[in-house]
Image (cartoon, rainbow, N blue to C red):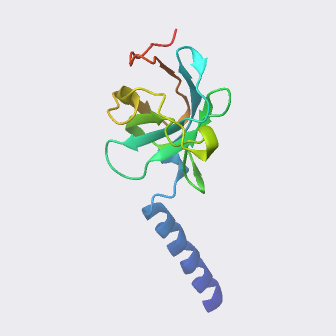
Amino acid sequence: MNFRLSVCLLAGSLLTVGSLTGCSSGDMGTVTGTITLDTKPLPNALIQFYPKSGGPASQGRSDANGNYELIRDRETMGAAIGEYEVRISTAGSGGGDYGKPAPETVPAKYNLKSELKENVEGGKNVINFDLDSQGTIIQPK
C-alpha cells in the first residue's frame, strides 16, 4: 500500500511541476508562411520573431521557394501566443563568392530597424511577408 501511495504522489508532483514551468502546448501556435522580395521568393532568409513581452524568440530559415516554419528551440515548434517584432535578414546566410558571407539584400526597415509587427495566436498561423527592396511593405491581396 505504501508503494502505491508513493507512486501516486510522485506522479502528481511531476504533473504539477510540468504545469508550473509552462510546458503546455496550449500557449503556443505554429507559424508558417512565405517571404518574398519584389514579388519573388526570398531564399535562405533568417526570420526571427522577438516577443514584445520578453522571453525566448522563435526563428526559421526560408527555403528556395521562400517558405519558412518557426521553431523556438530544438523541441518546440512555433512561437508563444502574443505580439512580436519580426526581423528578416539575408546577411551572412551563405551564398557569397568564395565563402564570403552574403550581403544584406533586405532593407533595414525589415531587420535592424524593423517595422514589422505580428501577432501569434493558438493553433495554426500562416503569416506571409511580401517585402519591397525599396522598404515599402506590400500588403498581401
> Is residue 73 depicted above or below 107 in this figure?
below
Task: Let me know if residue 48 appears in the view.
Answer: yes
Residue 49 % position (x, y): 44, 40
Residue occupying the far right of the picture: 64
**Along the viewing direction, whichever of 90 and 83 lies nearer the viewer:** 90
The residue positioned 48% from the left and 28% from the top of the image is 105
Q: Is residue 21 left or right of residue 112?
A: right
Number of labels in the image equals: 0
Q: In the image, is 51 to the left or to the right of 59? A: left
Q: Is residue 118 above or below residue 71?
A: above
Q: Position of residue 10 (x, y in %)?
A: 56, 79
Closer to the camera in the image, 86 or 105: 105
Between residues 40 and 70, which one lies in front from this camera angle? 40
Q: Where residue 73 appears, x then y in whole percent? A: 54, 54
Q: Does residue 1 show up?
A: no
Q: Residue at x 56, y 42 (%)?
A: 93
* Residue sitting at x 61%, y 91%: 2
Q: In the displayed image of the protein, which residue is found farthest to the front? A: 98
Which residue is outermost to the bottom? Answer: 2
Location of the N terminus by quadrant is: bottom right
Asked if 24 appears above or below 127 in the picture, the reply is below
* Residue pictured at 64% horizontal, 84% vertical: 4
Residue 70 placement (x, y as % from top left):
56, 41
Q: In which quarter of the image is residue 94?
A: top right
